[in-house]
Image: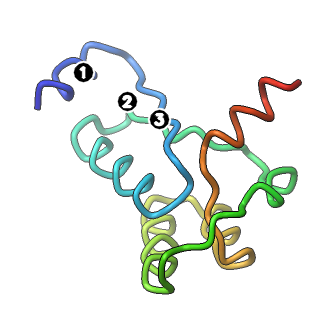
């Protein structure tokens, strides 16, 4: 609750969580409390990032739940990436690629 009060003092909260079930769950929890202030940072086009989806989910159930939550959140392209690659991506890979540019 203290974090939510602190986050509410900002106009926008950029969330750079892992692209997996836990990351989406954390974002959904913040979005429930912060509404449109919470923004899940993601590329507009995942095609350049597909090779970064390397983390095999612990179970097919987690993959399915991640797909469902991505759809619920309106992240259609991320849901498709989960379906096509059957893998997750850790956000550090994106940060590393951006830092290299």
The circle drawn on residue 37 is 2
**Residue 80, image x and y in percent?**
68, 72
Left or right? Give the position of 3 relative to 58. left
Closest to the camera, between mark 2 and mark 3, is: 3
Quadrant hosting residue 8:
top left
Secondary structure of residue under mark 3 = strand
Give the residue at mark 3: 15
Element at label 1: loop
Q: What is the x, y in percent for residue 7?
A: 28, 22
Earlier in the chain: of badge 3 and badge 1, it is 1
Residue that appears at 71% across and 40% down = 94
Question: 10 Å neighbourhood of mark 1: few (<14), some, or many (≥20)?
Answer: some
Alpha-carbon span between mark 3 and mark 1: 14 Å
28 above or below 100?
below
Q: Is residue 13 left or right of residue 100?
A: left
Provide the residue designation for mark 1. Answer: 8
State if disc 1 and disc 2 touch (CB < 8 Å): yes
Q: Give x and y (percent) for residue 30.
A: 29, 41
Question: Residue drawn at (39%, 35%), measured in percent from left and top?
Answer: 38
């Amino acid at each position: 609750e203290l974090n939510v009060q602190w986050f509410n003092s900002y106009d926008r909260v950029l969330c750079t969580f892992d692209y997996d079930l836990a990351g989406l769950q954390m974002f959904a929890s913040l979005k429930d409390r912060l509404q449109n202030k919470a923004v899940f940072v993601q590329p507009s086009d995942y095609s350049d990032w597909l090779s970064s989806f390397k983390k095999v989910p612990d179970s097919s159930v987690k993959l399915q739940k991640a797909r469902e939550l991505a759809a619920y959140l309106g992240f259609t392209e991320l849901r498709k990436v989960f379906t096509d690659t059957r893998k997750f991506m850790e956000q550090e890979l994106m940060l590393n690629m951006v830092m290299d540019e």
